[in-house]
Amino acid sequence: MVVTDAAHSFDGKRPVSDFRPTEAGQNLASGHFAAVIASRRFRIVAPLVAASSVIYLGSLIFLAYFPGVVTHKVVGSVNVAYVLAIAQFVMTFSVAIVYTREVGKTVDPIVRQAFEAVRKSETTGAKR
């Protein structure tokens, strides 16, 4: 099974509307939709997890091994430790926003195709 990244198709060549309902059902049954969705989600999630892990682990390392650095005052009574804590919140919301936008562009169209294929195969199966 070849997992493609072509937008809006399950075989990477034709749009979903070109598939007969039996082909759509075969793609669903073979797990092709699931493989494409998993592949696209991984391409989104992996960099986000890596970036947030680096910031989180970096914060822990600074807090554990460089106490002189984190107690340094930045502005008024705000020190580097507070800045690192705020960075965690910023990172959390950034990950959520980026994930939502990217999944909406790359994964959701494939999920809609899967639902459309199920609907078509159910409609065709009911007429027989």
Image (tube, helix red, strand yellow):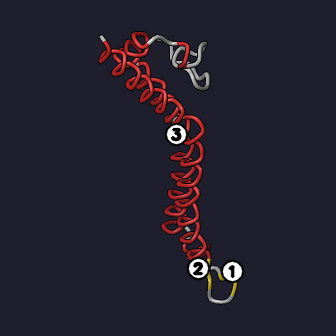
Q: Amino acid at mark 3?
A: Ala
Secondary structure, mark 3, is helix
In percent of width and height, residue 57 lies at 50, 56
Residue for point 56% across, 42% down: 104
Q: Amino acid at mark 1?
A: Val
Farthest-out residue, front? 127
Q: CA distance from mark 3 to mark 2?
A: 32 Å
Label 2 crowd (10 A; few <14 / some 14-19 / many >=20): some
Question: 80 or 2, which is in the foreground?
Answer: 2
Farthest-out residue, right? 75
How many numbered marks, from 0 up?
3
- Can you say which quadrant of the picture contains the C terminus? top left
Q: Amino acid at mark 2?
A: Thr
Question: 29 or 17, which is in the foreground?
Answer: 17
Q: CA distance from mark 2 to mark 1?
A: 9 Å
Secondary structure, mark 1, is strand
Number of the label disc, if any, that sits on residue 74? 1
Residue for point 61% across, 26% down: 7
Question: 43 or 100, which is in the foreground?
Answer: 100
Q: Determine which residue is flagged by label 2.
A: 71
Label 1 crowd (10 A; few <14 / some 14-19 / many >=20): few
Q: Determine which residue is flagged by label 3.
A: 46
